[in-house]
Amino acid sequence: MARIASALAAFLVWAAPAQAECSRTEYLDQRFTICDVTADDDLRLFLRGADGRTFGSFAAVNAALSDRGKTLAFAMNGGMYHPDRAPVGLYVESGDEQARLILSEGPGNFGLLPNGVFCIEDTRLTIIESRTFAQARPACRHATQSGPMLVIDGAYHPRFMEGSDSRLIRNGVGVSADGQRAVFVISDSAVNLWEFARFFRDHLGLPQALYIDGRVSRLHAPELGRSDWGLPLGPIIGKVVDAPGASQ
């Protein structure tokens, strides 16, 4: 019996599915899709290919990765961008700073201070208010600036209004206090910024969260059978894994 139990346990461990990258959830009658990553994952930003042209789509990033036996486990738009798809605010890719940090207040959500920077370091994932980031820059392998901050040290952005009628499909990212986990979120029903921040703070329990965008918010989640499309994107952020059948 002991041998049978041991064999069964081994089978169950072998047969258990890998932890899902992305999943759907509901909170207070609103629908969201969340994608979890850890500091050990290969999380990257993508803007332009080897030919210098902006990728603009998840399919284009995947095509470039496939040449190296890699693929996107999930991805979403990774920051606001100008009409020519150049990043708005700080953008760092593979250690190369391609757009500068912006500290001034301005129009639109990006300029609704405080805004922040999502930084991918070698051993942790952080979201840092932009002016604090300017005073002591960490060594970011990848970084994207966006705004506004949704949750700042466990508090909502001071200018959010609970009853705001500005409702959109929105996406953002939050990080754990220890910097070992990040959760990317896209709303599957229209939400205002206060409701979006509430999801990160009260449902996910994350002390820091950053708004990425609205209107153009899109998600690539193959395991959910989802890959949103539309007008070309600027920065794209995604988790890279070995493609099925790729040699190790």
Image (spheres, helix red, strand yellow):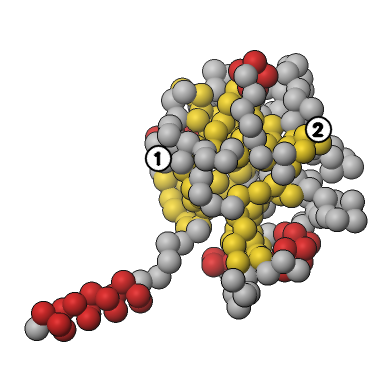
State which quarter of the image contains the C terminus. bottom right
Q: Is residue 226 above or below residue 146?
A: below
How far across and down, in percent of the image, does residue 56 sit? 80, 54
Depth order, front residue of 52/56:
52
Pointer 2: what residue?
99
* CB-based contact (under 8 Å), mark 2 and mark 1: no
User: Secondary structure under badge 1?
Assistant: helix
Mark closest to the chain's N terminus, 2 or 1: 2
The quarter holding residue 116 reads top right
Image position, residue 5 (x, y; %): 16, 79
Viewer-side residue, 165 vs 110: 110
Q: Amino acid at mark 2?
A: Ala
Which residue is found at the position 77% from the left and 38% from the top?
Answer: 96
Label 2: state its secondary structure: strand
Position of 231 compared to 200: left or right?
right
Q: Which residue is mark 1?
A: 203
Residue 86 image offset from top left, x and y in percent? 84, 40
Q: Position of residue 27 (x, y in %)?
A: 42, 45
Question: Residue 121 got which mark?
Answer: none
The correct choice, above or below, for 4 with respect to 47 in the image is below
Numbered marks: total: 2
Label 2 Cα neighbours within 10 Å, binned few <14 / some 14-19 / many ≥20: some
Q: Quadrant of the N terminus?
A: bottom left
Q: Which residue is located at x 51 percent, y 24 percent?
A: 152
The reply to whether residue 158 is in sight is yes
